[in-house]
Image (cartoon, rainbow, N blue to C red):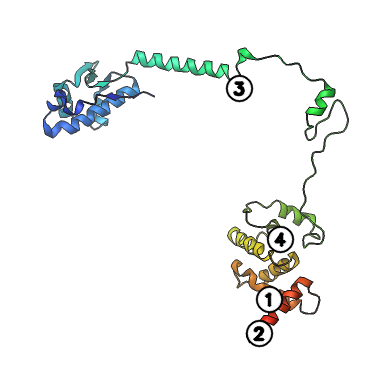
Amino acid sequence: MTWFLVDDGVDDSPELLAIPARYRMPALGLWTAIGVWMSKQHELFCPLDIIKKLGGTERLANELDACGLLLWDVRGTSGGLAYTGRRCRVKAPEQAQKDVAANAERVRRHRAKHSNGVDLQKQVDVMPLPPEAAEHYLAPRVGEVRYGGSETYPGPPKPTLRKPGTALESVDDSAWDLATSERGRSGPIKVGASRLVATVVPRNAVNDADRTILRIKASELLATETEDDVAECLRLWLQNERLGPAALGCCMAQVYKQRANGNLPKGVEKKMAGWLALGKELS
């Protein structure tokens, strides 16, 4: 990166004050734009077509030439403004090329020195461990054949969430693969709630936004209900097209009514008894 350096005394310099007041600020802006272009292009001459692209006019160019900040110069068949070195500093093309080459060489040496993370000139030869000793320090990789053997290392066992005695125990393998491959679970959502939604609610039944709300509501229900009750609640919600995903908890009353024949889990019976007692007290 090359910088166009400007003298901090240019605001009250004789060169700038020599420009008429009505042209002073536009000329100063053109002078700065030309200096930036010269510094970026590593040039000390700005052609007339570039001056016009920068918004310059012939009158402003003549004012810069008259005050000495830039000078008119004719090169070839076209003219332009040449660098004078007054009130600014632009690096010469030869010096800019030397700086670029020096920086490239410095980067090359740095990369060659630290290509392996250490100084190549200070590396120390280390005797490799024999196979008997390496066996105690090197952990086998999955699928690796150790020392010419015929058996490969299968890797650590994968954890499973299909626990016995839950609603997910009897799910077939295809549905379980779909549930375990689900992505996008947020931190507060219980894993079991996400699995229940992925297993009970088909992919094409709801959109992604409603599926996320269902996971949140199912997670809240799992704090007090069993997985079987929440799974049944999800099935009843699918049958009722008028309910939104946020109203999943409203289906729990239907779950209790369907199981009012005495086959309810003990936890549900206690809750229903408590709610009935509370209703009698309020009435």
Q: Which residue is mark 2?
A: 281
Q: CA distance from mark 3 to mark 2?
A: 76 Å
| Between discs 4 and 2, the one toward the N terminus | 4
- Provide the residue designation for mark 3: 117
Would residue 109 be found to the left or right of residue 204 on screen?
A: left
N-terminal of the pair, mark 1 or mark 3, is 3
Label 2 neighbourhood size at 10 Å, few (<14), some (14-19), many (20+)?
Answer: few
Is there any visible trace of residue 73 in the rendered image? Answer: yes
Q: Earlier in the sequence, mark 1 or mark 2?
A: 1
Judged by depth in the image, the label closer to the viewer, 1 or 2, is 2
147 up-or-down from 198: above or below: above
Q: Quadrant of the C terminus?
A: bottom right
**Spot occupied by residue 202 in the image (x, y as percentages of width and height):** 69, 61
Q: Which residue is nearer to you in this view: 48 or 87?
A: 87
Image location (x, y in percent) of residue 59: 15, 29
Distance of label 4 from label 3 (alpha carbons): 49 Å
